Amino acid sequence: MKTILVIGATGGIGGETARAMARRGWRVRALARHIPEAREGFDWIVGDALDRAAVIQAAQGADAILHAVNPPGYRDWDTLVLPTIDNSIAAAQSVDARLMLPGTLYNYDPRAMALVAPDAPQLPATRKGAIRVQLEQRIADACDRGMRALIVRFGDFFGPRPGNAWLSQGMITPGKPVRNVINPGLAGVGHAWAYLPDAAESFARLIEREADLPQCARYHFDGYWDATGTDFAGIVRDIGGGRHVRAFPWWTLPLIAPFHPTMRELREMKLFWRHSLRLDNRTLVAMLGEEPRTPIDDAVRDTLIGLDCLPVEKRG
């Protein structure tokens, strides 16, 4: 039985990948500051991703480490993101495990390219993008010293257990029926979405191809590409039984930002809703034969059920 250490198992991509690995017979060890009531058969360890000794201790005997640390509300990236990846790198090096990282679009400038391959030049246009580039560079440097890594970059996550996500935090209200859907995008501007169970399935299939992976493997996940910029919000409205799709009030953020840290951070994300940026998944498909893809209506329906916006009997 192989073992994976998941750092961030209480979050969206961390939790879904942990479940996908458990289904494949892997032993899942989860490091978290607090152990949730639903333990899901994982081996939980109390610890902080900022505590290097705790991370290294938790990694003992692990074949892979998933670094799914995600500061909530886009806050504190400048103080949390790089120290935590340094600790995960140290842990992976100490036990010769492959380090897995869910990547983002932020490494790129959507004004410079519309379709981006995994090896495209990284020219971030935002502060958070620059931090992500530094993060990946530290992983690349560690790979030059012998570490193995797997980076998969995704668009905006959505799913029944989303963690930080635009859909659940800015477009609808979890726990309430869908009335209006708030769309951050513009008509005609494409946007990349990643259904969390499909994203996790991709990670699981890739890590099981360990013998075929390069030293520092990088892939892009296409997911659901909303070419119009309005289709995804319309699907959420229709399946949720809502009435209208309304524009996200970007104009209010400068007014709210001085008093609301999350709103201050969201301002930087507007660029990715005003310019199309699609992830080229051809190398992922070449490796796996296909990209895991749940039909969009099913994915949205299960997401709304998971967010308590639809009754369970709506499933199927």
Image: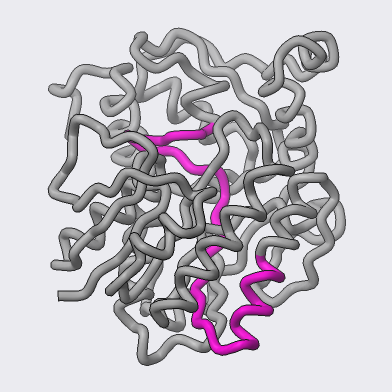
Q: Which stretch appears magenta?
A: 136-165
Position of the C terminus, as image quadrant, is top left
In this rendering, is residue 114 above or below 125? below
Q: Residue at x 40, y 42 (%)?
A: 12
**Nearer the observer, 299 or 307:** 307
* Residue at the spot 36% in from the left edge and 56% down from the top edge: 6
Q: Quadrant of the N terminus?
A: bottom left
Q: Position of residue 87 (x, y in %)?
A: 54, 61
Would you say 182 lies left or right of 54 here? right
As for residue 157 lying within the magenta part, the answer is: yes
Query: What residue sits 61% from the left and 87% below the top?
Result: 145
Which quadrant holds residue 108? Answer: bottom right
Colour scheme used in the picture?
A: one colour
Locate residue 218, reporting x and y percent.
Answer: 56, 75
The reply to whether residue 295 is visible in this rendering is no
Name the one closer to the observer, 291 or 24.
Answer: 24
Residue at (70%, 66%) from the top-left corner? 116
> Percent x, y for residue 171?
54, 21
